[in-house]
């Protein structure tokens, strides 16, 4: 992961993406849990960010959807970590907002960042044991 981050910092996006993707097979046989899903989530976000910086919002958004789905599963499935899932979704929305801005979709980016702020407030004021409906997710 750090190699990919270093390559991305150098602007070597294609190599960074390859580095991130090389991690995924290592996680295939890992049991599903919040810790491992955060690793998967980070990989998808990083790939999406690299694609966004390369100018391909659509491909980036596909990666953000993969990351978002991990969060949604934690929120909605028995045995999932609701708190981790909600935080995963917020992180994806934030990354997607910055990608939208890079793609020139400033109004969409602003609207999504507003959602992030509202969701963050909700998380801070809602006990983890609360069984309120799952967060809304764009498909």
Image: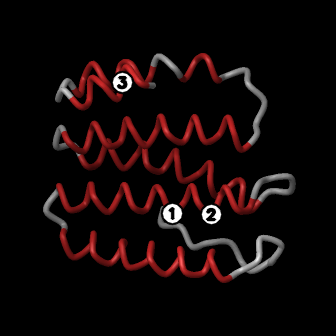
Tag 3 or tag 2, which sits nearer the N-term?
3
Q: Which quadrant is home to the N terminus?
A: top left
Residue at image position (31%, 24%) is 16
Q: Image quarter for residue 130?
A: bottom right
Name the N-terminal-most of marks 3 and 1.
3
**Are the residues flagged by discs 1 and 2 in contact, CB closer than 8 Å?**
yes
Q: Nearer the viewer, residue 54 or 33?
A: 33
| Pointer 1 residue | 90
Q: Which residue is mark 3?
A: 4
Residue 7 vs residue 57, the one in the foreground: 7
Up-down: is 116 above or below 15?
below
Q: Position of residue 23 (x, y in %)?
A: 52, 20
Q: Position of residue 19 (x, y in %)?
A: 39, 19
Rendered residue at 70%/80% (across/down): 126
Q: Looking at the image, which residue is at 51% across and 63% down?
A: 90
As helix, strand or loop, the secondary structure at mark 3 comes to helix
The residue wearing badge 2 is 86
Q: Residues within 10 Å of mark 1 (few under 14, many from 20)?
A: many
Dot 1: element: helix
Q: Are marks 2 and 3 in contact (CB under 8 Å)?
A: no
Is 52 on the left or on the right of 27, as rendered? left
Q: Secondary structure at mark 2?
A: helix
Mark 3 neighbour density, 10 Å: few (under 14) some (14–19) many (20 or more):
many
| Mark identifier at residue 124 | none
56 to the left or right of 77: left
Determine the residue positioned at 43% across, 43% down: 45
Q: Is 3 in front, or is 22?
A: 3
Q: Quadrant of residue 27?
A: top right
């Amino acid at each position: 992961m750090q190699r990919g981050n270093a390559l991305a910092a150098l602007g070597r996006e294609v190599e960074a993406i390859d580095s991130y993707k090389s991690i995924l097979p290592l996680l295939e046989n890992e049991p599903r849990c919040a810790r491992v899903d955060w690793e998967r989530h980070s990989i998808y976000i990083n790939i999406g960010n690299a694609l966004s910086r390369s100018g391909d919002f659509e491909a980036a958004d596909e990666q953000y959807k993969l990351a978002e789905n991990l969060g949604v599963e934690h929120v909605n499935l028995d045995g999932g970590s609701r708190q981790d899932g909600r935080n995963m979704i917020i992180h994806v929305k934030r990354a997607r907002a910055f990608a939208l801005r890079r793609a020139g979709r400033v109004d969409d980016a602003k609207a999504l960042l507003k959602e992030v702020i509202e969701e963050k407030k909700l998380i801070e004021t809602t006990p983890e044991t609360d069984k309120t409906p799952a967060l809304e997710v764009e498909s």
